[in-house]
């Protein structure tokens, strides 16, 4: 049976469009977006900025300081640090994005099911979440990698699982508030299935608060990925990655500062830009009303 209820829309004057406009009117969001865009373009268009192979070694050129030929110097075995920085940014940003995506997909799904159906299922999922939340995020990720084994794929999965409790809890609390709303009762009376109610009505109205967690969580995910790679539990040599580059540069920190400074700055700028956007999203969500349906 087709529901006659009005559906959320995304027109020029829709709540979603107004939220986006409100976000990008914020100076912090503008600055953060520019910095993040520069990092993304530099990383994914790396061949346009350097012709050097990030993994090509040249021991005779080891530990050369920054110059016009080598803007970020060379590492302990003569690899161009600028090329490794650019190509390493791809992996660092991807680890953060995949990690937060995995956490959001699993956590939001569990939160929707737990909050909507309640009962023993809610108790079971809440208990599972409480167990995960008993561990600090990085410690939980380390435990998962200890089970699955090191590797970049397992690192991304571990980061994602570490974020599941946060998304599950926030989604569940939102669903508990929404499931008794009048329009949800009307949808049930018109014969809408539980799946349709969750996807078409409850989830869209929960997305504003979840959007804040996603944007702020992305920065944390990049940091967690860099930490795991720094510990040697993610990307395997000679794959360039900012966290792994920090690890490799530690042994030369007194004689070759550029090996730790540049990847550290990359991580700093990526996380800072995302946090600036996240703050703007948080302010925009706090300053707007709950998503309404088109009359």
Image: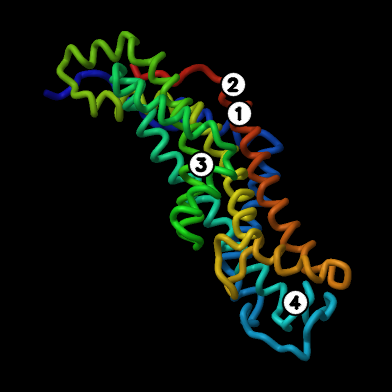
Q: Which residue is mark 4?
A: 75
Q: Which residue is mark 1?
A: 282
Residue 185 vertical position relative to residue 75 in the rendered view, above or below: above
Q: Position of residue 156 (x, y in %)?
A: 49, 53
* Residue 118 found in image quarter: top left
Q: Give the spatial CA distance, label 2 vs label 4.
A: 47 Å
Which residue appears at 60% of the width and 20% of the height? 287
Q: Give the spatial CA distance, label 2 vs label 1.
A: 6 Å
Of pointers 3 and 1, the one earlier in the residue sequence: 3
* Residue 69 found in image quarter: bottom right
**Nearer to us in this view, 232 or 3:** 232
Which residue appears at 20% of the width and 19% of the height? 4
Label 1 CA crowd tier, 10 Å (few <14, some 14–19, many 20+): some
Q: Which residue is mark 2?
A: 286
Label 2 CA crowd tier, 10 Å (few <14, some 14–19, many 20+): few
Is there a contact, CB below 8 Å, between mark 2 and mark 1? yes
Q: Give the spatial CA distance, label 1 vs label 4.
A: 41 Å
Q: Quadrant of the N terminus?
A: top left
**Nearer to us in this view, 14 or 198:** 198
């Amino acid at each position: 049976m087709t529901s006659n209820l009005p559906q959320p829309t995304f027109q020029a004057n829709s709540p979603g469009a107004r939220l986006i406009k409100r976000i990008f009117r914020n100076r912090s969001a503008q600055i953060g977006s520019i910095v993040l865009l520069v990092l993304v373009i530099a990383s994914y268009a790396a061949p346009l900025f350097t012709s050097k192979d990030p993994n090509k070694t040249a021991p005779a050129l080891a530990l050369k300081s920054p110059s016009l030929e080598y803007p970020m110097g060379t590492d302990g075995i003569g690899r161009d640090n600028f090329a490794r920085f650019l190509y390493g940014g791809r992996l660092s940003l991807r680890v953060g994005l995949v990690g937060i995506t995995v956490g959001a997909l699993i956590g939001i799904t569990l939160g929707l099911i737990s909050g909507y159906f309640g009962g023993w299922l809610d108790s079971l999922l809440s208990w599972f979440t409480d167990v995960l939340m008993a561990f600090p995020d990085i410690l939980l990720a380390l435990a998962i990698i200890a089970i699955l084994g090191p590797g970049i794929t397992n690192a991304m999965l571990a980061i994602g699982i570490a974020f599941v409790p946060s998304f599950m809890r926030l989604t569940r609390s939102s669903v508990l508030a929404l499931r008794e709303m009048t329009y949800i009762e009307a949808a049930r009376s018109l014969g809408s299935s539980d799946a349709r109610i969750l996807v078409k009505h409850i989830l869209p109205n929960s997305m504003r608060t979840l959007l804040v967690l996603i944007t702020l969580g992305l920065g944390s995910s990049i940091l967690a990925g860099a930490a795991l790679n720094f510990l040697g539990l993610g990307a395997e040599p000679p794959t360039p990655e900012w966290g792994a580059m920090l690890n490799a540069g530690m042994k030369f920190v007194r004689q070759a500062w550029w090996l730790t400074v540049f990847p550290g700055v990359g991580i700093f700028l990526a996380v800072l830009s995302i946090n600036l956007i996240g703050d703007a999203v948080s302010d925009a969500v706090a300053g707007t009303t709950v998503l309404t349906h088109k009359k």
